């Protein structure tokens, strides 16, 4: 699995236990809260909120949960303020990692993240120590069995996408500017393309090739980081070839 490809992670999460799915809904609920705080509760005028709602539906989050999260963030049901935090560091084998979090307690979250880096042989670094190796892009995944690469390329470019990556065995990844993610998604859907997922991601400029033993260690670190309630996303630049 390439460092930027999250589809396998998405598949894995969708098949997990109810407790794990509830954890995913909690994380998306926090994203909804932040989007509402930044741009208001109307997805028609808040493009970030519209994107998070689409992500929630991609993950089969019930409409009642979505509505409740929006009302809570807009003050109708009380609210909690979350702060966006980014942690950077290295895992074994020279793997660069970026950890995005939404937290109501920075000290707790930083301590939890640092503990996991240390536990799995990595090291947290200072802000900017690895982020220069990544670019933020919108990534839309489409199943290869649903469409040919030529057709998807035509539809994607017409919708305003930047490029397509076909390296993954199961899906195409359509790259967009993050500000255009919602428009490109709508353009593809209007053309009849079935979207598996669409979200902003961090795409590494280059990849490292850890040994199988190091890959197993990196996967454990990523899994444990993603299990933390405060952690929203984990990005890395390791080529992972072993089964997760």
Image (cartoon, grey):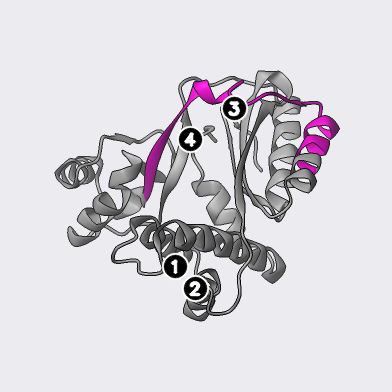
Residue at (14%, 44%) from the top-left corner?
158
Q: Is residue 112 left or right of residue 67?
A: right
Query: Marks 1/4: CA distance?
Result: 22 Å
Please tell me whether mark 3 sits on a helix, a strand or a loop: loop
The label shown at residue 228 is: none
Q: To which residue does mark 3 refer?
A: 238
User: Which mark sits nearer the N-terminus, 2 or 4?
Assistant: 2
Q: Is residue 161 left or right of residue 113?
A: left
Cβ atoms under marks 2 and 4 closer than 8 Å? no
Q: Is residue 210 left or right of residue 184?
A: right
Q: To which residue does mark 2 refer?
A: 66
Residue at (54%, 47%) from the top-left corner?
8
Which one is closest to the eye, mark 4 or mark 3? 4
Query: Is 119 one of the magenta-colored residues?
Result: yes
Please tell me whether mark 4 sits on a helix, a strand or a loop: strand
Taking 185 as reference, is 118 above or below it? above
Q: Position of residue 132 (x, y in %)?
A: 51, 21
Q: Position of residue 147 (x, y in %)?
A: 26, 51
Quick one: label 3, few (<14), some, or many (20+) residues within 10 Å? many
The label shown at residue 57 is: 1
Cβ atoms under marks 1 and 2 closer than 8 Å? yes
Query: Marks 4/3: CA distance?
Result: 13 Å
**Which range of residues does the magenta coloring cover?**
112-141
């Amino acid at each position: 699995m390439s460092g930027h490809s999250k589809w396998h992670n998405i598949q894995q999460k969708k098949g997990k236990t109810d407790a794990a799915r509830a954890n995913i809904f909690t994380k998306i609920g926090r994203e909804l809260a932040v989007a509402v705080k930044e741009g208001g509760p109307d997805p028609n005028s808040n493009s970030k909120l519209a994107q998070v709602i689409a992500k929630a539906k991609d993950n089969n989050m019930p409409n009642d949960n979505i509505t409740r999260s929006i009302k809570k963030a807009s003050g109708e049901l009380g609210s909690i303020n979350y702060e966006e935090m980014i942690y950077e560091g290295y895992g074994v084998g020279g793997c660069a990692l970026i950890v995005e979090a939404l937290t109501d307690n920075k000290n707790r979250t930083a301590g939890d993240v640092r503990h996991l880096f240390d536990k799995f042989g990595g090291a947290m670094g200072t802000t900017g120590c690895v982020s220069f190796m990544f670019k933020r892009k919108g990534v839309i995944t489409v199943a290869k069995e649903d469409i040919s690469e030529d057709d998807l390329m035509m539809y994607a470019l017409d919708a305003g996408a930047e490029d397509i990556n076909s390296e993954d065995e199961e899906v195409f990844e359509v790259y967009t500017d993050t500000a255009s993610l919602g428009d490109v998604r709508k353009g593809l859907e209007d053309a009849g393309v079935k979207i598996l997922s669409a979200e902003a991601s961090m795409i590494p400029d280059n990849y490292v090739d850890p040994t199988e033993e190091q890959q197993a260690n990196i996967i454990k670190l990523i899994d444990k980081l993603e299990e933390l309630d405060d952690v929203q996303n984990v990005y890395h630049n390791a080529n992972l070839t072993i089964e997760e």
